[in-house]
């Protein structure tokens, strides 16, 4: 990526751009996309995918062009076609139904989401009622709650609910969290839970994933220097929405989300000296490049990359894709 563009031929106003690092794809998203691509390569098109593999239309449409068909439920998948489960995780009923139908399936659930699923199961086997901090209706929350029998998990969406939500009084409690939450919001919710339930069991290690944490930290590092924060992401992407909120709370006067470069209203940057640019964990770097190209239509860019952490984590593909051979 050309972070240092050639000298401009036009006399355009100068605009400083602070590029947050890390930004964009995380290891779980990268793995999920590779699972779909490798399944298409190995088994041929079409490969069915239950729900958006990750929350990004550009990625979904790219995979559709390669031969992926996205569906909402398994009843839309033919008996002889491979199916991939999205990175957000699925309730246990989904692989159970796939097995009942003898469908060949690949689970692209992010390993860090799977870790939360295992935590939930361990709490359940130890007789604890679970409080799940997360957003109602988000696929990850649906998948996590679907690991256990109905009524054994209580969803907590904010600190007010943490203080008032009815919970069983005769069993020990534990909390777990969605992996893509605001670090600061979650801290407040956990504090409220601990105040109300001093004996509550906490995760041995933070459930909010490293990528969510790092991208929020990177935004905080540039927010008070930027007059506008541009977040490349999707409106149904939890981690991208959190970046908009984090930017504003950390002192940036305005933060906007765009899905593509063409979506950016250049008038928002008129008269500004410095803006920040970042991308949610399901947004590819090519979309950040689109935003920079869009900005160059009206400004001479001076780009500074501000990196708060180096990410070296990778996740292996499922065993079925690690060796050549027919399914």
Image (cartoon, grey):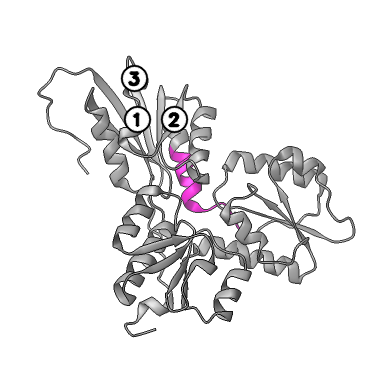
> Which numbered tag is attached to residue 267?
3
Q: Main secondary structure of the magenta part?
A: helix
Q: Position of residue 45 (x, y in %)?
A: 32, 70
Question: Relative to 275, does residue 188 appear above or below in the rendering?
Answer: below
Residue to which mark 2 is pinned: 256
Are the two marked residues, 1 and 2, in contact with CB atoms closer than 8 angstroms?
yes
* CA neighbours of label 2 inside 10 A, class few (<14), some (14 to 19), many (20+): many
Residue to which mark 1 is pinned: 264
Q: What SS does tag 1 mark? A: loop
Horizontal relation, residue 187 to residue 258: left or right: right
Q: Residue at x 73, y 66 (%)?
A: 123
* CA neighbours of label 1 inside 10 A, class few (<14), some (14 to 19), many (20+): some
Horizontal relation, residue 23 to residue 194: left or right: left
Q: What SS does tag 2 mark? A: strand
Residues at marks 1 and 2, CA–CA distance in whole angstroms = 9 Å
**Which residue is at the front of the view, 82 or 324?**
82
Q: Which numbered disc flags the more N-terminal residue, 1 or 2?
A: 2
Specify whether residue 204 is in view.
Answer: no
Q: Residue at x 40, y 62 (%)?
A: 69
Q: Determine which quarter of the picture holds residue 27.
A: bottom left
Q: Position of residue 217 (x, y in %)?
A: 47, 40
């Amino acid at each position: 990526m050309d972070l240092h563009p050639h000298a401009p031929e036009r006399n355009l106003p100068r605009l400083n751009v602070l590029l947050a690092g890390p930004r964009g794809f995380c290891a779980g998203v990268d793995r999920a996309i590779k699972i779909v691509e490798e399944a298409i390569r190995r088994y041929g098109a079409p490969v069915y995918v239950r729900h958006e593999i990750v929350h990004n239309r550009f990625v979904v449409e790219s995979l559709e062009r390669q031969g992926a068909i996205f569906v909402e439920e398994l009843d839309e998948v033919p008996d002889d076609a491979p199916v991939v489960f999205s990175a957000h995780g699925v309730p246990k009923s989904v692989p159970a139904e796939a097995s009942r139908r003898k469908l060949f399936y690949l689970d692209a659930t992010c390993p860090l989401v799977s870790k939360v699923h295992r935590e939930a199961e361990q709490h359940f086997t130890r007789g604890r009622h679970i409080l799940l901090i997360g957003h109602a209706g988000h696929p990850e929350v649906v998948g996590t709650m679907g690991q256990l029998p109905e009524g054994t998990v209580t969803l907590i969406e904010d600190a007010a609910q943490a203080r008032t939500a009815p919970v069983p009084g005769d069993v020990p409690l534990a909390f777990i969290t969605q992996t893509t939450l605001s670090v600061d919001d979650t801290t407040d919710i956990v504090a409220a839970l601990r105040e109300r339930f001093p004996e509550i069991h906490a995760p041995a290690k933070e459930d909010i994933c490293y990528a969510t944490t790092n991208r929020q930290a990177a935004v905080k590092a540039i927010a008070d220097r930027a007059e506008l924060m541009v977040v490349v992401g999707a409106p149904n992407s939890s981690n991208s929405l959190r970046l908009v909120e984090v930017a504003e709370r950390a002192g940036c006067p305005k933060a906007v989300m765009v899905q593509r470069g063409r979506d950016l209203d250049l008038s928002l940057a008129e008269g500004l000296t410095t803006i920040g640019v970042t991308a949610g964990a399901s947004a590819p770097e090519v979309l950040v490049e689109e935003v920079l190209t869009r900005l160059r239509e009206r400004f001479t860019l001076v780009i500074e990359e501000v990196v708060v952490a180096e990410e070296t984590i990778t996740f292996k593909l499922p065993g079925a894709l690690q060796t050549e051979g027919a399914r």
